[in-house]
Image: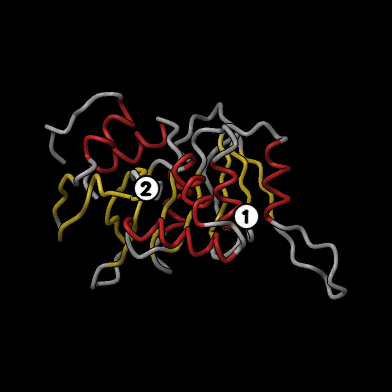
Amino acid sequence: MSRAVADVLAAVVASRASFVVTGGTGTGKTTLLSTLLGCVDPRERIVLVEDSGELRPTHPHVVRLEARAPNIEGVEAIELRALVRQALRMRPDRLVVGEVRGAECVDLLAALNVGHDGGAGTLHANSVADVPARIEALCTAAGLSRDAAHSQLAAGLRVVIQLGRGFDGRRMLDAIGVVSRRADGLVDVRPAVQRRGSQWSAGVARADLDRLLTGRDESAGGW
């Protein structure tokens, strides 16, 4: 990515906007999220809730909570949902839920809607525009209604950071999107910054991202 785009990612972290890192398998979602968490103010407490411990942020104040599968007798399991509730008692400045593959999507949305700014997580999705449909599918499969899923998404999430892989196998940033709610109550994610080949350009939500991060409209600038 360009230096200007890297500065945008740093601004997302500094602004305490909640975000998810999305992309396909092996695109570097966990690596990028760990790196971004390393940019968090060292005075803040980060609480990580994961199915399996993969995030390794370079940060002095990290608390790790890891889910546990049931034993051979089918008991003593510790689910992500229970860990999210426990995490809230630890006074987190940043609550982070690791890779979301299924019903734990409900837990991610719950974590982003508990009044703690700057929450984050990772999610499989093909593009920023596909994120609402992906979250809707995972949440409805877990028993959450479509309207509830979109309401939780609109209230809790601000930014989507999409990763991809080039033809040469390199992992790269594809786009940064901003979450917006339509008149019908459903959610869209519109690109604010997007890669076109080796170049970066402003997307339709560029001004929305600038206002979110700085409170100003800086859409006249370049990437």
**Circle 2 sits in a helix, a strand or a loop, which is it?**
loop
Q: Position of residue 178 (x, y in %)?
A: 33, 44
Reply above or below: 76 against 106: below
Q: Nearer the viewer, residue 111 or 49?
A: 111
Quadrant of the image occupied by residue 95: top right
Q: Residues within 10 Å of mark 2 (few under 14, many from 20)?
A: few
The answer to whether mark 2 and mark 1 are in CB contact below 8 A is no
User: Label 1 belongs to which residue?
Assistant: 50
The answer to whether residue 36 is left or right of residue 140 is left
Q: For the residue labelled by badge 1, is the local secondary structure a helix, a strand or a loop?
A: strand
Q: Position of residue 41 (x, y in %)?
A: 49, 29
Residue at 52% x, 40% y is 119
Q: Is residue 145 left or right of residue 191?
A: right
Kindly report the distance in space between the C-alpha atoms of the residues bearing marks 2 and 1.
Answer: 34 Å
Q: What residue appears at the point 43 percent right and 57 percent down from the top-left corner?
A: 29
**Residue type pointed to by label 1:** Glu
Q: Quadrant of residue 168?
A: bottom left
Residue drawn at 41 percent across, 31 percent down? 14
Q: Which of the image's four quarters has the C terminus? A: top left
Asked if 133 appears above or below 10 in the picture, the reply is below
User: What residue sits right under mark 2 in the picture?
Assistant: 184
Name the mark on residue 136: none
Q: Quadrant of residue 209?
A: top left
Q: Which tag, 2 or 1, sits closer to the chain's start?
A: 1
Query: In the rendered structure, which amino acid carries the disc numbered 2?
Result: Asp
Would residue 89 appear left or right of 222 to someone viewing this image?
Answer: right
